[in-house]
Amino acid sequence: MGFFIGLLGLVAGLLLPALSASKKVTKKKALLVIGIAFLLFVAGVACTPTSGKKHNAGPPAAGETGGNGASPDNNSGGEADTEEPSPQPGQAGTGSKEETDPATTNPAGKTTVHFIDVGQGDSILIQTPGKNILVDGGERGETVVNYLKNKKVTSLDLVVGTHPHADHIGGLINVLQAIPVTEVIDPGVIHTTKTYEVYLTLIDEKDIKFTEGRAGLKRDLGDGAKLELLHPSAPSGKNLNDASIVIKLTFGDVSFLLTGDVEQESLKQILDNYSRLKSTILKVSHHGSRTGTSSAFLAAVSPEAAVIMAGKGNTYGHPHDEVLAMLDKAEIKIYRTDLHGTIIVTTDGRTYELNIKEPYRYNPPQAPDPEPSPAPGTSPEPQASPAPVPQPNPAPVEEDKLAVISLTETVSAGETASVAIRGKPHTQYSITVTYKSGPSKAAGLETKTTGADGRVTWSWKVGTRTTPGTYPITISGGGESITVNFTVK
Ligand SMILES: [Zn+2]
């Protein structure tokens, strides 16, 4: 506005003398008018608010957000007020000193994602330049609270309980008790455990804003950090794992997909509903259970690195071998809290860094048969001691060489004994079990033909009146013969 007044003044100042010249106005007077006009002009320019043209000249980020289309897509159910103008305290050091790309308001500063080692469970701390967010809290206990205190996190802007299982929300109880929380997002499915009840009661008592997490919910976290929920659309509550909230966190070019414990059905739904799943880092679902990963899902997400959150020596056998094999095959780097401890990813929105440099190396389980195959050729000595062969697997297993691959070494009279061999494929093998009384005629000891894999198994009942002792089993076929012993008690 002032600009125009100034401009008008300047124009008037230039025109007036010209007009008045004819009226013989003194030169002095004309100069005075020009001077005043010029002053007005300068003042006008100075008062004009900086327009969109210059957005990198240093006014603090708060002033900019409105100006150049920071996020036109922030239309998620009146959440505009999540944009606090001033960053939260406790995060002071992270303000970006260097100027960011003037063409974009994208990432300023750094975002850090902590995959906290809570044993068998999930807990992920996200620190954007302006916000602290916690996704899950592991089992009940102080582990996460202590971690937060250690990282000087004194308040949380958002807590997400992906689903009501104790290995996810248990520790959130301790967090809610110890640290001020602004909002909790939860799938809102009914679950009748004490843990869930205590958690809900705390949210209520502390008067924390509670939001049901549904696919499509978006939050602009400021500083170029965004969060979107991809799941659940409508949780059935039948399978609590499938009710898990799935989050995509984006910071510039680097993104994280946090999948809770979703299982196959949800993976399919997410694949159907979202075409842009590609993420830099994937938190593998359900602690690396085979129920939480599919190759189709991995192909769509196509992460550079995968984080598996599982407890060392957990009773579920997580992570499952199939999942490790899938990740390995897709050439995705694997990081595991059970082996690496807490995994911290820091990103400036362009590249990222992991505190753990060396990924876990997947070694497929040893080749075809887990049994230590007996020495090639006949073995006259009793089979009783399986001889812990320390040798690095002697003699590459010759596929066609006849070998016993399993045997019931000791059987009580009246029980069933069995022996399995591997020989030539599609070949007949006969078996002879010789007791004190002579060759057994028990059912199950007929000549058999191996399958395509060269394997065949015999099972037979050891008579109740068989004399205890050690007896030979001889198997012949394909031009070979092998004898092993077994003992009847
Ligand atoms: Zn879990």
Image: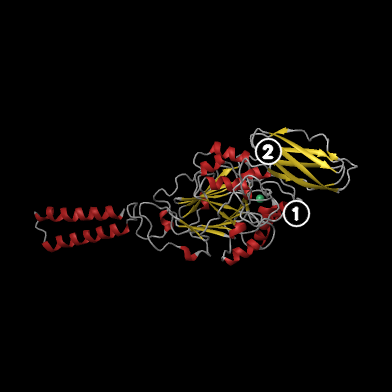
Q: Which residue: 10% across, 55% down?
A: 21
Q: Is residue 392 above or below residue 439?
A: below
Residue 413 percent location from the top left of the image: 87, 44
Q: Is residue 238 above or below residue 15?
A: above
Q: Which label sits on residue 163?
A: none
- 431 sits to left or right of 462: left
Question: Which amino acid type is shown beneath numbered disc 2?
Answer: Arg
Q: Residue most toward the right?
A: 465
Q: Which residue is mark 2?
A: 455
Q: Toward the viewer: 457 or 84?
A: 457
From where the camera sits, is residue 212 visible?
A: no
Q: Earlier in the sequence, mark 2 or mark 1?
A: 1
> Alpha-carbon distance for marks 2 and 1?
23 Å
Q: Which label sits on residue 385?
A: 1
Mark 1 Cα within 10 Å, few/some/many (few <14, many 20+)?
A: few
Q: Toward the viewer: 344 or 313?
A: 313
Question: Which amino acid type is shown beneath numbered disc 1?
Answer: Ser
**Residue 267's quadrant in the figure?**
top right
Residue 166 percent location from the top left of the image: 70, 53
Residue 293 percent location from the top left of the image: 60, 44
